[in-house]
Image: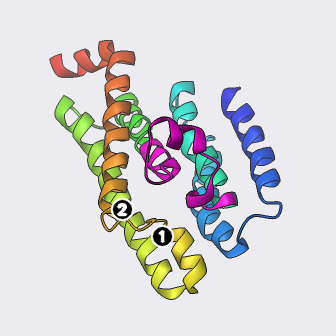
Amino acid sequence: MLPVVLLAAYLVHFTLLGIEPYDRSVWWAENIPIILIVLTLVVSYRYYRFSNTAYLLMSCLVFLHTIGGHYTFERVPFDVVTGFFDLQRNHFDRLAHFSVGFYAYAAAELLLVRRMVTSRIVLFAFPLTIIIAVAGSYEIFEWLYAVNADDRAGHFVLGSQGDQWDAQKDMLADTLGALAALILFYFVNRGQVRQLHRA
């Protein structure tokens, strides 16, 4: 039931934030990967259903990224957080990148439920590695888009806000999100994880 509710909420969210975005080309660039993720989850639902926790965690990126696509990540109204922590830039994009790591929970869950691994090390290391690889690949996509798009759209998709280490910090945020998700996964599923270790 929860996945259906999340999908319905996303469709409303997507529709409303598709109305007069700050830059339509940026909106497409930011939303196409998310649409592909949602379509993959919808199609896979027939063959494998993740836990409600996994779907809830995966939805965080979907909703946050759709907001970023409407405003551009640099312009998302995030002043309360920026002001409270006296930050020099808008860190909404870091929050979205942190939520990318939440997909490690679903990956670990799939490995455990389908008994695709026999090692606890692999159970946790493989999802973490996947997230790091996806993070690096997405940074390359952003760079290629910035190089080939018009200057204005490229600037907003890249979203570095003048930080020369933005790509590395984004990848770090993805990795920390994955670590947080895997820690949660362990505590939620520690009984099954311990059985795997004994086996």
Judging depth in this view, the residue of 79 and 9 nearest the camera is 79
User: Is 109 on the left-hand or right-hand side of 32?
Assistant: left
Residue 143, picture quadrant: bottom left
Q: Label 2: which residue?
A: 166
**Which residue does the image show at 52% across and 34% down from the upper left?**
57
Badge 1 or badge 2: first in the primary sequence: 1
Query: Residue 48 at x, y = what percent?
Result: 54, 37
Instruction: Give the Cα distance between marks 1 and 2.
Output: 9 Å
Residue type at mark 1?
Answer: Leu
User: Is 8 on the left-hand or right-hand side of 29?
Assistant: right
User: Is 32 on the left-hand or right-hand side of 182?
Assistant: right
**Residue 199 appears in the picture as rendered:** no
User: Is 94 on the left-hand or right-hand side of 118?
Assistant: right
Judging depth in this view, the residue of 175 and 43 nearest the camera is 175
How crowded pointer 2 is (Cα within 10 Å; few <14, some 14-19, many 20+) is rated as: some
Q: Quarter holding the C terminus?
A: top left
Compared with residue 36, is residue 52 higher up or lower down, i.e. above or below?
Answer: above
Compared with residue 75, is residue 63 higher up or lower down, i.e. above or below?
Answer: above
**Which residue does the image show at 30% across and 63% down from the upper left?**
165
Residue type at mark 2?
Answer: Asp
Residue 177, picture quadrant: top left
Q: Quarter holding the N terminus?
A: top right
Query: Residue 80 at x, y = what percent?
Result: 58, 38
For label 2, the SS is helix
Query: Residue 67 at x, y = what percent?
Result: 66, 51
For label 1, the SS is helix
- Is 62 within the magenta? no
Contact check, label 1 and label 2, Cβ < 8 Å: yes
Query: Residue 159 at x, y = what percent?
Result: 49, 65
**Which residue does the image show at 23% across and 16% down from the upper left?**
194
